[in-house]
Amino acid sequence: MSEQSATPATTSATPRAVKAVIPAAGLATRFLPATKAVPKELLPVVDRPVLQYIVEEASHAGVTDVLLITGRGKTSMVDHFDRRPDLEARLEEKGDAERLAAVRRPSELAEIYTCRQPEQLGLGHAIGYAESHVGDAAFAVLLGDEFVNLAEPLLPAMMELQARTGGIVLAFFEVPPSDTKRYGIASVEPAESEYADIAEVVKVTGLVEKPKPEDAPSNLAVLGRYVLPAGIFDAIRRTEPGSGGEIQLTDAMDLMRREGTPVHAIVYRGTRYDTGQPLGYLQTVVQLASERDDLGGEFRKWLTDFVNAGFPGGSST
Ligand code: G1P
């Protein structure tokens, strides 16, 4: 576990989730041809792959065990979290301590396990493959193409809330009406006051996957972080294909809610990086490069000059 963990003191009776599942079997058609041979989760944000940011987020929240749900052609994701003795020996010989630490870092974050989703039949279907690894305890889910600013952590508060409610815990962020068709969208009411010490918590009264703006019950979108009780696996088995013909996690969670499982969410107002589509990916790279101690100063200067010069080389449309 990281020494920088922002985990709050636990006041709950039930244990907190310590396992996390990262579904990362998708085909990433939005990034073709880059993702023809390279998993989108390994696309670099400055000098670390997206997936490392996600595993770092889990590790900072106290997660010690990460299950990656992978698919065909994606085994290099697992290699990233393995040791690399030949490379490490070379860096050691050269006395390059900084790069050596960077190369070892991914293998120190958590125990990484994998399983395969043989066919991509939806997010709910993917999570269903985690059942035997997860067992009976609550667990966290982190989607493989988005992460939050580690200085504004989300997962520790979600895990604390789940340990207290025993139900489903989600995180929401606000989206413009035109974007509701990209996300799970919730209807909510005020949460019980006993959870007010944790964060801005709401109680969920309905969930719908990717509604059109006119059908959306609110502008609160499901962020790619979940803390789920093990009962989700049975609910997934009983969930029919929904939006896009896929077995949706949103639908399985809403089934549990209708059957009496409490569903709460934290409204997240920190920075969310969405690397799942090219524009969000570029914005993430620029933001995180600007903040880097090593190259941020020079990059910001170049970027400012580039913008002030009216984007030379680009079209004005
Ligand atoms: C998935 C979920 C959706 C959620 C979104 C967050 O959609 O199904 O409910 O709002 O992640 O990024 P996907 O991005 O896989 O289409």
Image (cartoon, rainbow, N blue to C red):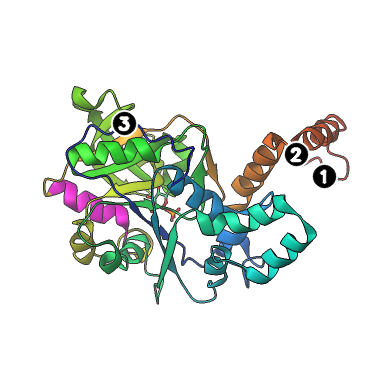
State if disc 2 and disc 1 touch (CB < 8 Å): no
Mark whose residue sits in front, 2 or 3: 3
Q: How far apart are labels 1 and 2 at the CA level?
A: 31 Å
Which residue does the numbered mark 1 point to in the structure image?
Answer: 315
> Is residue 250 in the magenta section?
yes
Q: Observer-nearest residue: 39 or 123? A: 39
Closer to the camera in the image, 143 or 81: 81
Helix, strand or loop status at disc 3 = loop
Residue 294 numbered mark, or none:
2
Marks 2/3: CA distance? 34 Å
**Residue under the image location 57 percent in, 66 percent down:** 83
Q: Residue at x 66, y 45 (%)?
A: 285
Q: Amino acid at mark 1?
A: Ser
Instruction: Name the residue beneath numbered marker 3.
Output: 9
Residue segment shown in magenta? 247-258
Is residue 211 visible in the rendered structure shown here? no
Q: Is residue 25 left or right of residue 285?
A: left
Q: Nearer the viewer, mark 1 or mark 2?
A: 2
> Residue 175 location in percent, x, y?
45, 36
Asked whether residue 317 is drawn in magenta, I would say no
